[in-house]
Image (tube, grey):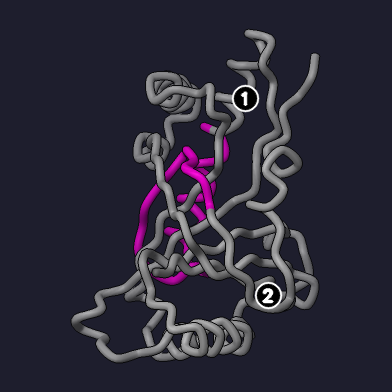
Amino acid sequence: MDKLDLVKHFKSYYTAKAKPEILNIEKAQYLSITGKGDPSGENFAKKIQAIYPVAYALKFAFKAKGRDFVVSKLEGLWWYDEQRFAGISIADSPKAIPRSEWEYRLLIRIPDYVQEKDVQTAVAACFASKGQEAIREVSYFEIEEGKVVQILHTGPFDREPETLAKLNDFMTANALGRNGLHHEIYLSDFRKTPPEKLKTILREPVK
């Protein structure tokens, strides 16, 4: 049985360079769970512990139908109240906005043949098995980002402002305005990888 690996199938989506570049991102679908607060906190960990069991429940359900796939990379959309914290640049926001004020949507991309009803079935089965309340928050989600600017960040998350500054300068030089939520794709498993070796795609929808 062939196993679909979305990372290999959508290479441009999961690849970035160490300097800013423009590309177009196609419509995609995901498992999703939302939250707010410090990503090093307990609540964030609970969200991760909820979304992964659903991803694997979905995987095994489709494997039984002869359509196996690899559970893909964790991703996150990040935002904050821009009226309350007005005038802060992309590069400054990680340090200027308290971690408690960041909102997020964790994502795991799923194959195009997976339907919303399949996700709902997997959520119900997973909750029945594990009983974790947060599992019931996992849902089907679609997004079409279109034109984006992105860059590869290598190193710990607290050094991201340095890389975001390059992205910000590139957007300014090319007269590109923000057109969506800050998007991160975690190419490394940050639960197991040393901070200095972490690789993260930083992506900004633009117009």
In the rendered picture of this protein, how many numbered marks are placed on residues? 2
Which quadrant would the C terminus be assigned to in this image? Answer: bottom left
Marks 1 and 2 close (CB-CB < 8 Å) = no
Q: Furthest residue to the front?
A: 174
Gap between marks 1 and 2, in whole Å?
A: 29 Å
Residue 149 placement, left or right of 195: left
Q: Position of residue 151 (x, y in %)?
A: 64, 72
Find residue 153 and name its label. Answer: 2
Location of residue 141 (image quadrant): top left
Residue underneath mark 1: 59
Q: Position of residue 205 (x, y in %)?
A: 44, 65
- For marks 1 and 2, the one nearer the N-term is 1
Amino acid at pointer 2: His
Residue 192 placement, left or right of 110: right
Q: Is residue 145 above or below residue 184?
A: above
Bounds of the magenta span? 25-54
